[in-house]
Image (cartoon, coloured by chain):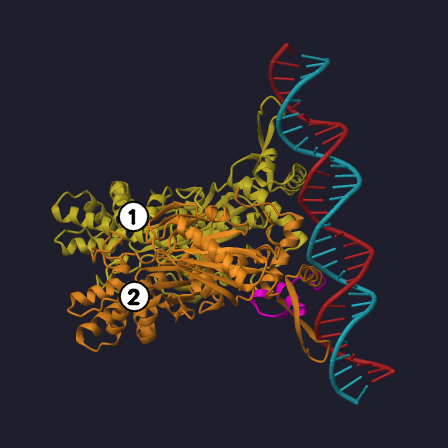
Chain colours: A yellow, B orange, C cyan, D red
Amino acid sequence: MEVRRTTVRDMRRSNRSVILTGIYREGPLSRQELTVRTSLSAASVSNLVAELIAEGVVEEAGSVESEGGRPRVLLRVAPTFRYVVGAEVGETRVRVELFDLAMNVLARADHPIATPSPEAVVKHVLEGLSTVIAASGIQSEQVLGLGVAVAGVVEDNAIVDAQTLGWEAVPLAELLAEGTDIPVHVDNGANMLGQAEMWFGAGRGATDAVVALVGSGVGSALVAGGSSYRGARSSAGEWGHMTIMYGGRQCRCGALGCLEAYVGAEGVLDRYRLAGGTVDADEETAFVELLESTTEPATAIVNDTIGYLAAGFANLVNLVNPERIVLGGWSGLLLGEKHLDELRAEVGKHALRRPYAQVSIVLCELGRDAVALGAATLPVVRLLRDGGAVPPPR
Amino acid sequence: MEVRRTTVRDMRRSNRSVILTGIYREGPLSRQELTVRTSLSAASVSNLVAELIAEGVVEEAGSVESEGGRPRVLLRVAPTFRYVVGAEVGETRVRVELFDLAMNVLARADHPIATPSPEAVVKHVLEGLSTVIAASGIQSEQVLGLGVAVAGVVEDNAIVDAQTLGWEAVPLAELLAEGTDIPVHVDNGANMLGQAEMWFGAGRGATDAVVALVGSGVGSALVAGGSSYRGARSSAGEWGHMTIMYGGRQCRCGALGCLEAYVGAEGVLDRYRLAGGTVDADEETAFVELLESTTEPATAIVNDTIGYLAAGFANLVNLVNPERIVLGGWSGLLLGEKHLDELRAEVGKHALRRPYAQVSIVLCELGRDAVALGAATLPVVRLLRDGGAVPPPR
DNA sequence: GTGGCTTCTTCCAAGTCGTGAACTAAGCAG
DNA sequence: CTGCTTAGTTCACGACTTGGAAGAAGCCAC
């Protein structure tokens, strides 16, 4: 029985959560606005807000004049109530960032990594954690949690499979927890970038969306009904290995005709090479040159890429009927910046009329750095869900 | 603010719902088992169950000896507490069925339809409703609701678009409500078949699944986290028009290379014809003959179809990571009955290793008649969600 | 100032709910 | 019939929201 009971305490926690989430996500709000939006009674809002203020989670932040009467006092989540740390584990480096609750970066630490062994990563994440805490001059008790983003499949805070790092079955959260008392959350990198875009970037306001990431690899983060959808076992969103050309190009996953083999930067450059184009050794430079070239093979390759990507988008549009698709990833952004309108039009050729009319296709607003930002939202999500209750120290 | 407040009443409703859902979905249960599964206190279970029994929703159904102590009294949802009606609106007929809450069919009515105008459909559904109520000898107040399944896009109980019927923007629920006091629910046919399979067929027990329907057309019903996923605007699940062969065969939707153009019965037979096969005028006969033929073009076509369908499945596996895929639809079943193992193996060639290992691919267990059964679950879903509270008469 | 207005706060009674502990019911072995 | 075991019930209690009413707080126009 997956459904859980409700007790009289859940009620209060849930109402605290509603109020806190409202204040956090919909900017500074007055109590009066909260009573309207939550449909709680004024008495309850007053009561709950007083409690939240007493605990320090919420603070008053100026006031706004009303129509002739007492001005409304605006409430916001106190940015310095607690802090959160986000870490991005990449193939070549570990990046750790500390944020206040308003998600301002207060400190940053970067560690290059030669070989990404679990031990080295754990060591550098923990070092980075200490560094950013020291640099920002706060107490470690003030840190609500550490979110870690890894490019791999994550089930229950453990890495199940991370091919780019060569990891399999690494209980990363557990390993990290041995070195710190701060609560640790581990999740997939694409999901975290998606999370960042949904909260602070091009996804704001959408409840059913897909954040599509096109770089050397191709992936996506699915958002359904306002929260990230992970599927039965946390690996949903593997959009890059969708077959769009049955029997087509060989993909590095072993299958034929995957989207990634056509629109991933590597695949695109490879196709360009085969068509007689000259390709710079550096992937990114080569990609930019391809986009800027006006020679025949280059423009054809770019057009084809737009078509393939559009088919991939259309498959998403048809299957999950999102209200928004956010295109990101380094090569996706480069392509999108020049050719978004063509892309949109191409999607219309492959998608069904109705869902196509309901979707808006936009570009990511945050940079690649947003991965750590997204990871740092993990502890915030928990804080909001729990109505401001801080996890007990271990 | 999409999140709603919780009041002291929601708590009881929610707990009644938890208990009632448990009793309904997990067979007869004793109070004692309910306390364990819901983690409610024994006192509360007793209290809530007493209330449900007093209202007639739940009844005691024999007892089971315990290990040496007082026997447990089993509880079940009283099958005759209320009744539900499901209707299937097809191109050529309207079928209406009346069930008790245990989903036993008590009466059935079939109306052939010449031209499926909204007026004719409304008329025949209402007539069918009266017929089945009269035939089963119950009062119309005893009918909890009428669920109607239509092959088309349904938003908020209104048909938005039903190409096979030639409908656009038909407020079907509203039209039906003018002719009856029974609460009306309208939904998409594929979703209803999926719902039936999830509750009573091959989908039982799964929370993240896809019911794939392959017939003349191709569609699917997505189930995420235990409930049907409809996307932003209710048209999620359009799996048939996923591009699997970029630039490939023309599909009736206008695009090129859709899955449906390759694995829909029409598409398969058309490919067979092009390969030199002889095709019977009747689609179903032709399809059976194709499957049974051992000639070269026939076996090649069948093998190709398995490959294409496998690619379509693999795309689902990668993107939504379901724990189960249920294959249904008339031609899908015919194909699956003979070639399920090959199909499973082919999916493995296109899907990523991990999500492929996590999914089981099975055949539908219910016939095509299950559409009305699925539609009839709509009022039941509502009953369970509301904890046994019956919608007030209008 | 004064009165008017809106925004909060405080208080209270009423009503709801789940809980724990004590209690009753029902079967069985001897 | 006794004692034991398990299942289900009763009841006082504390926690919670609500609605209403009274009032305080803060600002404005006059």
Amino acid marked by disc 1? Gly
Q: Could one spot residue A171 in this view of the protein? A: no
Q: Could one spot residue B85 in this view of the protein? A: yes
Q: Where is A344 relative to B227, above or below?
A: above
Q: Is residue A333 magenta?
A: no
**Where is residue A141 drawn, in percent x and y?**
58, 50
Amino acid marked by disc 2? Leu
Depth check: give the residue in front, B145 or D12.
B145
Chain part drawn in magenta? B24-44
**Where is residue A57 drawn, in percent x and y?**
60, 42
**Where is residue B292 drawn, in percent x and y?**
25, 76
Q: Is residue A289 left or right of residue A325?
A: left
Report the number of discs.
Answer: 2
Circle 2 Cα neighbour tier, 10 Å, few/some/many (<14 / 14–19 / ≥20): many
Q: CA distance from mark 2 to mark 1?
A: 29 Å
Secondary structure under tag 1 reads helix
Q: Chain of mark 2?
A: B
Q: Is residue A56 left or right of residue B109?
A: right
Secondary structure under tag 2 reads helix
Q: Quadrant of residue B293?
A: bottom left
Depth check: give the residue in front, A113 or B376.
B376
- Circles 2 and 1, Cβ within 8 Å, touching? The answer is no
Q: Which residue is mark 2?
A: B309
**Where is residue A150 drawn, in percent x and y?**
41, 57
- Let me know if marks 2 and 1 both belong to one chain: no
Q: Which residue is mark 1?
A: A332
- For the point 17% across and 75% down, the residue is B296
